[in-house]
Amino acid sequence: ALIERGEYDHFMLKEIHEQPESLARSILPYIDQAAQTLNLDDVAHKMFTKADRAVAIACGTAYYAAHTAKYWFEQKARLAFETDIASEFRYREPVLPQTGPAMFVSQSGETADTLAALRYCRQNGTQAVAVVNVPESSIAREAEAIVPTHAGPEIGVASTKAFTAQLSVLAVLALSAAKVRGHLLPGDEANAVKTLLALPRKITEALKSQDQIREIAQTLTQSKDVLFLGRGRYYPLAMEGALKLKEVSYIHAEGYAAGELKHGPIALIEKDLPVVVVAPKDELFEKTISNVEEIRARGARVILISDEAGIQMAGNRADHIILMPEGDDISLPILAAIPLQLLAYHVAVAKGTDVDQPRNLAKSVTVE
Ligand code: G6P
């Protein structure tokens, strides 16, 4: 069927706004709503009960989804979880898990390096789990188990709704692994289900910051560099935010772990350098805020993406604030994607770039 932009100026914007529905479509198949339980026990039993560790391999935005999942798998399921970009993994003769799976995250299911990494794993006897958006793709066909995302066709070259769909499915997988490995109490499972089911509504809420983000975007159009910082589960989000901005606005951007700032990137900070800080309030919040103080003291302009509690604690230490809905350690990293996508989009529109077809990029990279 022909997919149209409808009322939206670009597919990217349409796909950003579709996320309440694409997320619901991606989550619902994996939840038993009546019983308030997760519905992926079969795959989880087969793949994770006896796993010594797991690896997750992907490229681009899908890699940042996998990297976020590492925090969930380790913290919730106590499963050692390594991530790597496919082009590195496939050539270094990696040591594979003995009893655990290799997971492959891909929107298209056709990325050449990711597919080659999958074949390497299978040749070496490691089970492959595919988290793919195109169920008839090569990666889906060649994996032992597929746990599809149902984001629907994504047209914009810069991935948006496929990313949040990947995150949500990986969250269900991590929670299911926690369950079969005995790290989830019955009450925890019902809570997790509630969190997941609330996500579509919270995304609608997060989308309401659009006008304000558009204004902040106007202040970035002349910037040569933008730094994105995050800690813990928000570190991969900082990297994804930077990737989105470079892809569509052509502004140089770097995503960094906030704690690593003083080991290099702080040398870049000069007056008015925009620094986007992704930091809902969590157990590491104060550490991130002390990094914010260090960069502000050097003249950086801080754009803080946080929830109510975080914004209160930050006080006047940010120059711009983007308010996120309330959530927990599963939902907040997913919700943080929304303001990052909107920011990249509006900077690109203000600069007049070709948002849906950025120069030099392809939607699906089927050659090396
Ligand atoms: C290309 C796209 C990216 C995407 C990456 C991985 O570079 O432009 O948006 O994240 O490939 O694609 P996949 O289909 O494997 O998720």
Image (cartoon, rainbow, N blue to C red):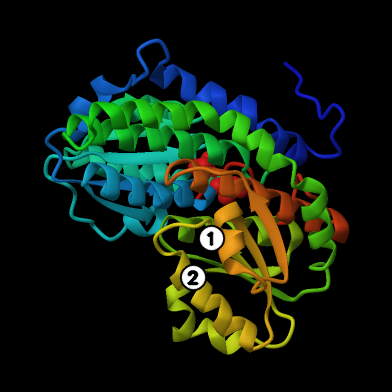
In the foreground, 180 or 244: 180
Using residue 157 as the reference point, say whether residue 265 is left or right of it: left
Q: In the rendered view, would you say 70 is above or below 179?
A: below
- How many marks on residues? 2
**Mark 1 residue crowding within 10 angstroms, few (<14) / some (14–19) / many (20+):** many
In the foreground, 232 or 105: 232
Q: In the rendered view, would you say 156 is above or below 7?
A: below
Q: Is mark 2 within 8 Å of ligand 1?
A: no
Residue 279 - label: 1
Which quarter shows the N terminus?
top right
In the foreground, 33 or 117: 33
Image quadrant assignment for residue 282: bottom left
Residue at the disc numbered 2:
288
Identify the residue shown where x is 55% and y is 24%.
24
Using the numbered discs, state the Cα–Cα distance from disc 1 to disc 2 in whole angstroms. Answer: 7 Å
Name the spot of residue 8 as percent of width and height, x first.
84, 34
Q: Which amino acid does label 2 sit on?
A: Thr
**Mark 2 residue crowding within 10 angstroms, few (<14) / some (14–19) / many (20+):** many
Discs 1, 2 touching: Cβ within 8 Å? yes
Q: Can residue 74 be seen in this view?
A: yes
Q: Which amino acid does label 1 sit on?
A: Ala
Q: Is mark 1 within 8 Å of ligand 1?
A: no
Residue 155 - label: none
Image quadrant assignment for residue 313: bottom right
Using residue 159 as the reference point, say whether residue 191 is left or right of it: left
For mark 2, give the secondary structure: helix
Name the spot of residue 25 as percent of width and height, x first.
55, 21
Q: In the rendered view, would you say 259 is above or below 140?
A: below
For mark 1, give the secondary structure: loop
The first of marks 1 and 2 along the sequence is 1
In the foreground, 136 or 102: 102
